[in-house]
Image (cartoon, rainbow, N blue to C red):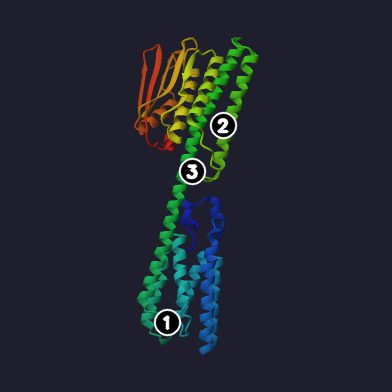
Amino acid sequence: MARLGGTSHAVPLRKKGEQDMGDEGWLARHGLYFWFLVISGVCLVVNLVDGMVLMSHGPSVGIGVLLVACVVADLWMAVRPRIGCWTVFLVLLAGTLSPVPFPASYLLSCLAAAGFLGYLGIKLGVAACVPGVLYAVLLAVLHHQEYRPGQGTPLSFALLCVIAALAGISLRLTRQRDTERIRRAAAGRNAQTARRLHDYTTNDLCSIIMMTDRLEHGEVGVGQAGGQIRDLATSALEHTRTVIRTLESSLPDDGEPSEPQDFTRQLGGIASEQQRSLSLMGFQGSILVPTHLAWEPDPERGDMICGLLRELAGNIVKYASPSGGYTISVMQTGEAIIVSALNAHSQSGAVGLSSGLRRYRELVDRNGGTWSQSDDGITWSLHVELPRGAMASQAEDIA
C-alpha cells in the first residue's frame, strides 16, 4: 500500500531527520512513494471516469461540485498523505448527507485511505475504521434511493474499511520487524568490528610500546626494531580504517563480498608474524600451528581461532616474563581443534584473565567448547577445545 512512518506514530522506525521530511519525503527516500502515487492515481482516474458517466445521465451543478471535491480529495491524498486521507473520508460523509448522488467508485478511494492510514500508524489505522462505520450508519438511516445502486450494503463497506485498515497495520508491523532485524544485524556486525578492533589494534599498539621501551634501554637496535614498529603501526592503521569503513556503512551487505581466506595459510601467517614480533621484544618461545588439517572449520570459527591466537600473543607482551619462555600451539584431533598456551609470569606479577580472553571464553562456552586455565604462581597455562560444528554468533560477544 503506502509506507509505514508518520511523525509521532512511527518514531521507533525513523530517525529525527526522517521525521522532518514528512510522510511523502520518507516514502520517496525508501522507494514507496511511487506505489503510493500509483494507487492514488488509479483511484482518481476511476472516480473521474465514473463521475463523467454519472453526469452524462443527468448533469447538474451539485454532481459537478461533488465530482470536483472527490478529485481534489484524491489529489490531496497523493500530495499530503495524512491530511489527504482524512479529506477523502470528509468528502464521503459530506456526500452521504447530501441528496446529490456521487460516484460509487469513490468508495475505492476510501478503502485506499483506510489502508494508507493503517500503514502510517496503528492508532491512525484504528481511527480510520470510524468513518466507514459512520458512513454505513448514515446510509442505513437516511434511506436515500440515490445511494443504493452499486454501493453495496452498509455493513459490507464498514467491514471492508476495517479489513483495509488491518491490512495497512499488518504491513506496517511487517516493515517494523524487518527494520528491527536489519538493525540487529548491523549491531551484530558493529559488535564484531569492536571485537576485531580490540584483538588487533590494541595488541599492535601494546607491541609498539614494548618495542620502543626496548629501544630506549638499548636492548635492541634501531635498524632491527624500526621495520617491525612500522609494520605494527601500519597494521593498526589499516584495521582502524577498516573499522571506520564498517561503521560508516548503513547495511550489513553494503560492500562487495570478500574472498574467503585459506584457514591454514591465514593461521600460519599470524603465527609467523606474532612470533617474529615477540622475538624482537625479547620473548623466546614458539607458536606451533598445523600446515594441513583433516577438515577446516567454518569461516566464523576459523576467524575466532585466529583472533584467539593473536589475543594470546598480545597477552604474552602484557603479562609474561621475557626470560621465562612461552609456547602457543594449535592442533587438530578427531572432531575438535585444540588451542593451548603456556608462559611464565612477568616480574610485576600481573596475571589474570584479560577482557579480551574473557570474551573468547564466553564465546567458546556458547559453542559447546571447553576452557581450562591454570596458574601455579609461576606459570600460566590454557587449554581450549573447540568441537566441530556450527558457530554461534560472535555478535553476542560484545555486551
Label 3 to label 1: alpha-carbon separation: 51 Å
- Identify which residue is drawn at 54% across, 78% down: 48
Q: Provide the secondary structure element on which disc 1 rests.
A: loop
Mark 3 or mark 1, earlier in chain: 1
Q: Secondary structure at mark 3?
A: helix
Tell me which amino acid carries mark 1: Gly
Q: Amino acid at mark 2?
A: His
- Sequence order check, earlier mark of 2 and 1: 1
Residue 357 percent coordinates (x, y): 43, 26
Q: Foreground residue, 327 or 41?
A: 327
Q: Which mark is residue 150?
A: 1
Label 2 CA crowd tier, 10 Å (few <14, some 14–19, many 20+): some
Marking on residue 186:
3
Q: Which mark is residue 324?
A: none
On the picture, is 377 further left or further right than 309? left
Q: Residues within 10 Å of mark 1 (few under 14, many from 20)?
A: few
- Residue 49 versus residue 113: which sits nearer the camera? 49
Residue 377 locus on image (x, y percent): 38, 12
Which is more toward the observer, 238 or 217?
Answer: 238
* Direction from residue 394 to residue 19 in the image, left or right: right
Q: Which residue is mark 2?
A: 239
Q: Identify the secondary structure beneath mark 2.
A: helix
